[in-house]
Each structure stands twice: as C-alpha cells, then as structure tokens.
Amino acid sequence: MSEAGSMVWPSPGEPLWAFDWRLPDYPDEEGLVLRSVRYRNRQLLYKASLPSLRVQYDGPCGPYKDPLHFNNAQPTARCPATRVCSWSYVSGGLRALVLESYHTIGAYRLTHRWIFWEHGHLMARLFSAGLQCNYNHRHHAYWRFDFDIETADRDLALEYNTYTPNSGWGPGWSPHLVETVRLKNPPSSRSWAVLDRDSGRGYHLLPGSGDGNADAFAPSDLWVLRYNGAEDRNGRQGSAANDGLAPYNNGESVDGTDIVLWYVGHLAHEAAHGGDEWHSVGPNLVPFTIWA
C-alpha cells in the first residue's frame, strides 16, 4: 500500500506552496517524497526524498540500513487515520505548513518531516529516538534534492566559503562545473546553492546546526551530480556498509544542466542519554533573489 496526495498551501487563492507527495511502500525506501514542488508558482524541485538512513554503532551491533516507507509508518494521535500527517502553525509571526510521517523500526522511533514557511524557507528534518543497542551510534541521513529551478536545465551549482574571492558570483561564491563530492567546513561557513542561469533565482542549502561531519563510515557530506534517471533508485541504492553513491560521481558537466544534490546529516546519539531523548538532523533550503 501507499499514500499520496497534492497540496496547495495556504489556499488556492493564495498558493504560496504547491506540490505532490507520496509515501511509497516496499521495495521503495525513500521516506515521504515530494514532487513538482513550486513556490509562488515557480518551479523549485522535481523531487525531494530521503533515500537512505545508515546507522553505525561503536559496539558489536549493525551496521544497519533502515528503510522508511509506508509499511513501517504508523498513525499518530494527531492523525490517527492516516500515515501522512499535515498541519499549519505560526511561529515568530510567520506561517508554516508541516508534512510528516512517523515510523518504527525495531526500537527506533523516527519522524520524517518537511516544513514549508511562507517566506520560502523549506526545512528537511529527521527526528530520531530509541536505542537498538546500548552503545553510542550515529544515524547518517541522506537527502536527495533534484532541483528544477524554473526549468529542468540551465541550473548551476555554487559553493560558499568565507575565504573565496569574488569570481563573478559575489564574495565567497565559486561554481562547480563538473560533478564533485564535498565535505562540510564550519570554519569557512561552507554551504551550497543551485541557481537558474537565466532568471538568477535559486536556493541556498545550509547545513543544520546539528548535522555533524563525515567520518570513515560515511566519508562525504555532499554530492553535486548531473541528473540521470537510472541513478534515482527510490532508496534501493547502497547498503548498510556502503552508501553506493561513488559510481554516480563520474566527472560529468553540471554547467547549466539538470542538477541533483545529495546531502548527508550525521546524527550522534550517546547511549548514556537513553532511548527516550529525541534528536534531529537536516538542512535548510533558503531562497535568494526575488521569487514573487
């Protein structure tokens, strides 16, 4: 089984956000999937998903690759009759829409959440609680963002570092013209962006404050890739021991093409904290230039 639908928020008369969503069932393992995401009636994402969640333990457990799909989704008190739940709220004077699914895998309790803000910010979050084994461990959450800003092509990937001189894209910004793999670098405020070459509209991908850094088990933080339909395997790429993304980075041009960013958040959980404490991980997508 699966659940699917479409949303226009906050209303058809004020369509700030519009998108399709789907929570697929096994063998797809990519959590709560967004498609055809539009902000202020302009195309932003062709697809956004969470295709991989790998867990490493310091002790003799795992590693694990935890699937997020309809089959392990559960109803909640807020939405007792469905597996996908949505509601709106106001914070700091801004309206927001939440779309989420709640999953149980062994002792783990996991919430996959998207938060859409009226000023264009999109927050991707995974919340985790539970302790499968009594050892320190890390959840490595892999998001896949297939950007189609305005159209499916003519996009450009940029990277920001405080030490980078102005090369035509503004102080700190430099382009990635071929496929590449990158690491976070908090001292230089490293982050990434995708923009449409024609309109100049784009979105900034900012690592979350608790997103951690790569390690030997999950040795990368971000991939800049050219879209290839065969590389979207709906969560069936890789394994518990290997993320399976290395073959996708083969040096193709991403200069004015259809760009996909894979981003990893590394969520640390100390066994001493027990299984009841909730932890969260995930990036923020923030618009730049005018999207009105």
Image (tube, rainbow, N blue to C red):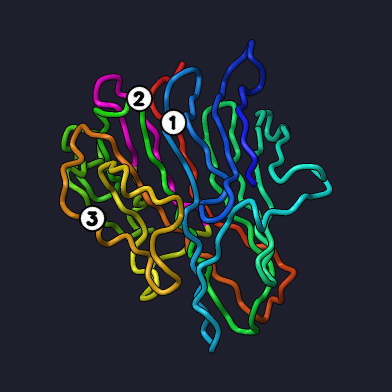
Residue under the point 36% across and 30% down: 148
User: Which residue bears the numbered disc 2?
Assistant: 201
User: Which region of the structure is painted magenta?
Assistant: 193-209
Q: Secondary structure at mark 1?
A: strand
Foreground disc of the pair 2, 3 = 3
Residue type pointed to by label 3: Asn
Residue type pointed to by label 2: Arg
**Residue 249 numbered tag:** 3
Marks 1/2: CA–CA distance? 8 Å
**Residue 287 numbered tag:** 1
Q: Quadrant of residue 66?
A: bottom right
Marks 2/3: CA–CA distance? 26 Å
Q: Secondary structure at mark 3?
A: loop
Q: Earlier in the sequence, mark 2 or mark 3?
A: 2
Q: Quadrant of residue 46?
A: top left
Measured as percent of width and height from the top left, residue 4 is found at 62, 36
